Image (tube, helix red, strand yellow):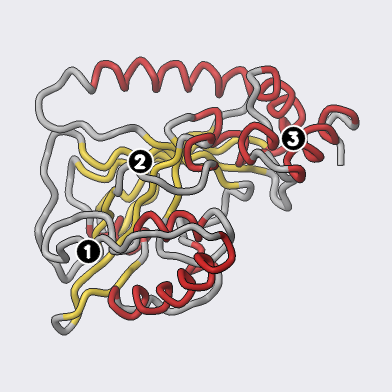
Amino acid sequence: MLILKNHILMQEKEILTWDSWKKEISILQAEKQGEEKQSGYISTLLFRGHKCASWKLESTLERKGIAFPSVSDFSNTIKIAKLAFESYTGNSWSTEFNSEEEPSPPEDYEFMVYLRHHGFPTPLLDWTKSAYIASFFAFQHPSSESTVAVYSFREFTGQSKSSCTSDSKIIGCGSTIRTHKRHYAQQCEYTYCRKNQDSNWFYSGHEEALENKSKGQDIIKKYILPSCIRCEALADLDSMNLNAYTLYGSEEGLAEMLANRLFKCDY
């Protein structure tokens, strides 16, 4: 497990085989059913796959090397992008302002999700409700490392969060929105982080938020699997109808699915 100043950031568990991982998923699903019978609010159990186990929990904004903007500055930035996308697609996205005083999805949340699915950098971190879908993303492309990782995350476990606004805090946004069709195919949910600095709200990072989390909230576990089981994993996932075509719904996804089948993913 990762520990900072006697504080557990996340638990780590090594899984050696694909069958062992499937058994672990069954255990997680059984634990989930038991936890949801407890008192207090129990949030959805979410998953995220990384093709390199060394990768941190970083949004596309961070991976692009973009400094965290203020909430208002980022909102103004994507309004420009929204005009371009509305002109190109003929669609329109409403701007729903959410109070900055209470944890809630950010302004332009639905459009931010749409941008996220098209590669535009945002502070959102995307998750899925399915451990198997997260596993597909972990194994989808060959890794440059010997291990991949699948994270599990539960924001609330029956206890409320601390209210210190100066600390980075993880905020779950929910899944019931109108946005890109991949959102539903991939069973997505999203989180983002923010903190208050000099009376202004700024987006912030998940790794920083984990350092400030209180006991009983933002429970993250990291499962480390060997990259060498990639072909076995993808073949089994394909038999469940989880592949690039069903999850992306594009010609590129169809080509990737067929290549994996015809070349046994050995490329």
Distance (Cα) linking label 2 and label 3: 33 Å
Could you say which quadrant of the image residue 242 lies in? top right
Relative to the observer, which residue lies in front, 178 or 174? 178
Task: Indicate the secondary structure of the residue bearing disc 2.
Answer: loop
- Name the residue tied to disc 2: 175
Task: Indicate the secondary structure of the residue bearing disc 1.
Answer: loop
The C terminus lies in quadrant = top right
Amino acid type at circle 3 is: Cys
- Name the residue tied to disc 3: 228
Task: Indicate the secondary structure of the residue bearing disc 3.
Answer: helix
Vertical order, 81 against 129 (above or below): below
Q: Is residue 115 left or right of residue 231?
A: left
- Name the residue tied to disc 1: 97
Amino acid type at circle 1 is: Phe
**At which x and y percent is residue 5?**
26, 59
Q: Earlier in the sequence, mark 1 or mark 2?
A: 1
Circle 3 residues within 10 Å: few <14, some 14–19, many ≥20: some
Mark number, residue 222: none
Relative to the observer, which residue lies in front, 56 or 91? 91
In this view, the residue farthest toward the right is 263
**At which x and y percent is residue 11?**
38, 40
Circle 2 residues within 10 Å: few <14, some 14–19, many ≥20: some
